[in-house]
């Protein structure tokens, strides 16, 4: 049974991040925070009652390809129809095209619920949301008129088509070619792999956003253009016309997210439309990619929370062994080490959730109010959020299996699915190393660590606001200040390693993980300050937040010192291993 954390989001939006201010900026005052929290209540109910029951079914049945057609698992098409008809696909899209116009801070909260309920299912509308963002940003008026309303309504779905057999992270190696046909359209030829929800039976049309190069384009990233390639070519009035020259060659047999059809697509002169400017395809694609990167961080929180909830339920019921310091027949949740795992999962998920909401809030305010400082903070934290949340999600899912003991290794308990589903999130939309290289190369070293120093100053300001008369708050402030000091040393070490050096790139992931861990402590500082200032926070709610913050400070922030040692060391062993 999945329980959406609607109360956690209500506290965050009301007490920590001033959600009403964000709504006023985004909506001009026509929506109250009570309205937004009501929306999240409906999202949680839909996630728990409609989507979650299909999770195990999708994992067992998977999607299937037969006679060139992909069929989704039982129940998925009907659930998607309800999901789309109730406006959840376009929750954050512009009202001009039929969307809900909700800020990301609300939409991403709902997306966590959907991801937790059914990670594979949620990927389909999640990709559509990225395609909508790209079309809103760079499509011409003619394409917007035909494509945006069906995408926003969910009648059509979107995909992101970048990867090729020889071109994964290295997009410069893309070989797919688009040739002008003289009538304003392009003939797209090539093969794309790993295309999530690249073909399916949930919607009447699928809109592929395809990176390709034109025959006269230069080599490298500067030669790439972005094309909109529909499965069925719409007529001018929007009605569906003929089937495009796109073939689903195969679908992958995967470790996890088995209900999501990951397709190999062959484009044989398929009709496409230029999206944005010629030879500036990454401009539009990165709009979608950035939306998806934050979305993957949110998805990681959802998967982690689902795994935690299942582990907690098992631990509270399972009787095994004599529990030290407890009466006979105490459940394993009372074993000290099982409790350690459960509190570790819970406290880290709270930090991850708050960080995702903070980044979403910065994006909302930066885009609507034109706040360059908040937008810069969001840009800095997107790779951290994606990398740290996804790597941590895998650890949490693994710990959830551990809580189950031997039963965790048995598929019937269901916990193994979440571990398998979690393993992809640090890989897709760019591996953790790709995001760490972005953080270090583009966001840290280009200004010699100036922005990173400013961020650490912000975290220190929050640490200073923790009430000194509360013992937990006092300990958290001390631990956070110590961790900040280690991060400052790490930042200086990376600056000294220098841009594009092997030393810097070899420790970029540890730096990302150190910053993510400290950002999690920052979120706990904000949570504790808000909780202690709230006269209504009493009893179990108060104690849980204080326990979580204390645990996180002792068990997670303490890792900052070891990260600094790794980062100062740079690359170790280069030149010592003889060539094969």
Image (tube, helix red, strand yellow):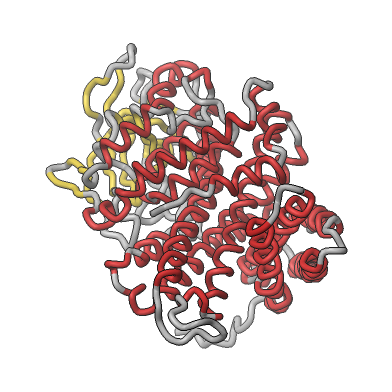
The single residue placed furthest to the front in the displayed view is: 327
Q: Position of residue 209 (x, y in %)?
A: 41, 36
Residue 239, above or below 551: above
Q: Position of residue 325 (x, y in %)?
A: 57, 85
Between 344 and 441, the one nearer to me in the picture: 344
Between 454 and 225, the one nearer to me in the picture: 454
Q: Residue at x 12, y 43 (%)?
A: 67
Residue 23, above or below 183: below
Q: Please state if 307 lies on the left or on the right of 187 as rendered.
A: right
Q: Quadrant of the N terminus?
A: bottom left
Q: Residue at x 54, y 86 (%)?
A: 324
Whether residue 532 can be seen here? yes
Residue 484, above or below 155: below
Q: How many marks?
A: 0
The single residue placed furthest to the left in the displayed view is: 67
Q: Position of residue 531 (x, y in %)?
A: 73, 53
Q: Quadrant of the C terminus?
A: bottom left
């Amino acid at each position: 049974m999945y329980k959406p954390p609607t109360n956690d989001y209500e506290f965050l939006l009301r007490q920590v991040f001033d959600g009403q201010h964000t709504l006023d900026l985004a909506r001009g005052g026509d929506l109250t925070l009570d309205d937004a929290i009501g929306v999240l209540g409906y999202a949680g109910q839909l996630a728990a009652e409609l989507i979650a029951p299909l999770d195990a079914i999708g994992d067992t049945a998977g999607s299937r390809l037969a006679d060139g057609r992909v069929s989704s698992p039982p129940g998925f098409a009907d659930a998607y129809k309800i999901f789309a008809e109730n406006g959840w696909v376009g929750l954050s899209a512009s009202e001009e095209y039929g969307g809900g116009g909700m800020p990301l801070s609300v939409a991403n909260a709902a997306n966590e619920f959907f991801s937790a309920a059914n990670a594979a299912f949620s990927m389909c509308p999640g990709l559509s949301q990225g395609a909508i963002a790209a079309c809103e940003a760079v499509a011409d008026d003619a394409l917007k008129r035909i494509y945006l309303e069906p995408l926003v309504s969910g009648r059509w779905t979107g995909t992101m088509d970048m990867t090729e057999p020889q071109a994964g992270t290295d997009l410069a190696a893309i070989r797919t070619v688009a040739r002008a046909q003289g009538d304003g359209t392009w003939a797209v030829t090539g093969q794309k792999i790993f295309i999530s929800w690249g073909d399916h039976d949930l919607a009447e049309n699928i809109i592929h956003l395809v990176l390709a190069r034109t025959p006269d384009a230069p080599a490298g990233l500067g030669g790439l253009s972005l094309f909109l390639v529909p499965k069925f070519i719409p007529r001018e009035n929007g009605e569906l016309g003929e089937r495009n020259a796109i073939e689903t060659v195969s679908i992958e047999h995967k470790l996890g997210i088995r209900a999501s059809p990951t397709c190999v697509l062959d484009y044989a002169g398929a009709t496409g439309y230029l999206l944005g400017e010629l030879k500036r395809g990454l401009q539009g694609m990165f709009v979608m990619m950035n939306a998806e990167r934050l979305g993957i961080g949110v998805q990681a929180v959802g998967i982690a929370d689902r795994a935690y909830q299942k582990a907690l339920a098992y631990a509270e019921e399972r009787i095994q062994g004599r529990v030290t310091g407890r009466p006979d027949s105490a459940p394993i949740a009372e074993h000290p080490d099982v409790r350690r795992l459960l509190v570790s999962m819970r406290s880290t998920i709270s930090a991850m959730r708050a960080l995702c909401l903070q980044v979403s809030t910065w994006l909302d305010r930066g885009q609507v109010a034109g706040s360059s400082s908040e937008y810069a903070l969001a840009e800095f934290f997107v790779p951290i959020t994606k990398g740290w949340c996804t790597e941590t999600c895998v650890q949490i899912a693994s710990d959830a299996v551990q809580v189950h003991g031997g039963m965790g290794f048995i598929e019937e308990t269901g916990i193994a699915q979440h571990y398998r589903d979690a393993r992809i999130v640090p890989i897709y939309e760019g591996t953790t190393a790709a995001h760490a290289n972005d953080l270090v190369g583009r966001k840290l070293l280009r200004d010699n660590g100036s922005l990173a120093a400013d961020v650490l100053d912000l975290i220190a300001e929050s640490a200073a606001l923790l009430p000194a008369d509360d013992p937990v708050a006092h300990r958290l402030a001390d631990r956070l200040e110590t961790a900040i000091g280690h991060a400052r040393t790490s930042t200086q070490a990376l600056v000294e390693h220098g841009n594009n050096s092997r030393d810097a790139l070899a420790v970029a992931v540890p730096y990302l993980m150190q910053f993510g861990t400290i950002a999690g402590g920052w979120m706990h500082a904000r949570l504790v300050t808000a909780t202690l200032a709230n006269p209504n926070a009493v009893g179990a709610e108060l104690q849980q937040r204080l326990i979580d913050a204390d645990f996180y400070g002792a068990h997670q922030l303490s890792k900052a010192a070891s990260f600094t040692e790794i980062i100062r060391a740079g690359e170790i062993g280069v030149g010592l291993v003889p060539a094969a």
